[in-house]
Image (cartoon, rainbow, N blue to C red):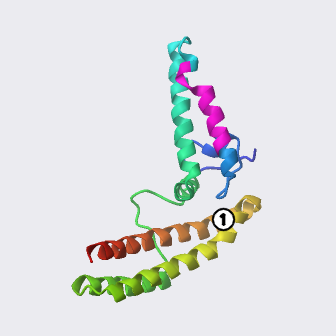
Amino acid sequence: MPNRLLTNSMTDYFAFYGLSESFRPDGAALKRLYYAKSRETHPDFHATSSPENQAEMLRQATLNTDAYRTLADPDQRMAYLLRQHGLLEEGKQEQLPADFLMDMMDLNEQLMELEMEPDAAAQARVAAEAQTISDTLDAGIEPVLAGYEQLPADHRPAALQQIRTYYLKKRYLLRIQQQVATFAARS
């Protein structure tokens, strides 16, 4: 198991399962580990043990559930890993690249126009443009996510920065896509 330098006190869910840190863990292996830990820590199997042991098993069972839910979901896993490395802070305004913000400003202006004058064709164009941007972002980051685990330790910080920028862009874009969906639902 590689030694990981983490910048905060969050529990290392990968270490909890004995897995290497990865943006693309083996889902079947993760599920097997979750079920094995569930059987190991289930309160029914510790009903006759000491109250301290029962409390610890309950804590472990909760940790198991939290770890599995986080690692099984790609978006939660990405946010978790970025937080683990001190690259995402809740409530902090994150800076996005100027070129991306310019593209988003154009989409936001189109959304404001849709708010003033609903138009199904314009709404479909905005939705398609947002989806194209999203697909381009996904295609660009996929090799980084897939290859992260094999990177030498000294190359991981740069990859994490790329992933952080991707994550922030996707969150911004998701808000726009949600607005477009809201307009579509009104029509």
Nearest the viewer among 91 and 121 is 121
Q: Percent position (x, y) of residue 59?
A: 52, 29
Tell me what residue is drawn at x 56 percent, y 17 percent.
46
Most frequent secondary structure within the magenta stretch: helix
Q: Based on the displayed image, in which of its 4 quarters is residue 125 positioned?
A: bottom left
Q: Reply yes or no: does residue 57 show up in magenta.
A: no
Q: In which quarter of the image is the C terminus?
A: bottom left
Q: Percent position (x, y) of residue 71?
A: 58, 50
Q: Percent position (x, y) of residue 110?
A: 34, 87
Q: Based on the displayed image, in which of its 4 quarters is residue 152 positioned?
A: bottom right
Q: Percent position (x, y) of residue 44?
A: 54, 20
Q: In this view, does 151 lie to the left or right of 68?
A: right
Nearest the viewer among 27 and 155 is 27
Q: Quadrant of the N terminus?
A: top right
Q: How many labels does the image show?
A: 1
Q: Is residue 114 left or right of residue 7?
A: left
Q: Is residue 116 above or below residue 83?
A: below
Structural crowding at the residue carrying mark 1, measured as other residues with C-alpha within 10 Å and reported as few (<14), some (14–19) or many (≥20):
some
Dot 1 falls on a residue whose secondary structure is: helix
> What is the magenta range?
31-44
Nearest the viewer among 179 and 57 is 179
Q: Name the residue under label 1.
A: 145
Q: Is residue 144 visible?
A: yes
Tell me what residue is drawn at x 63 percent, y 27 percent.
40
Tell me what residue is drawn at x 30 percent, y 76 percent.
183
Q: Can residue 9 be seen in this view?
A: no
Q: In this view, does 49 lie to the left or right of 114?
A: right
Q: What residue type is labelled 1?
A: Leu
Nearest the viewer among 121 and 111 is 121
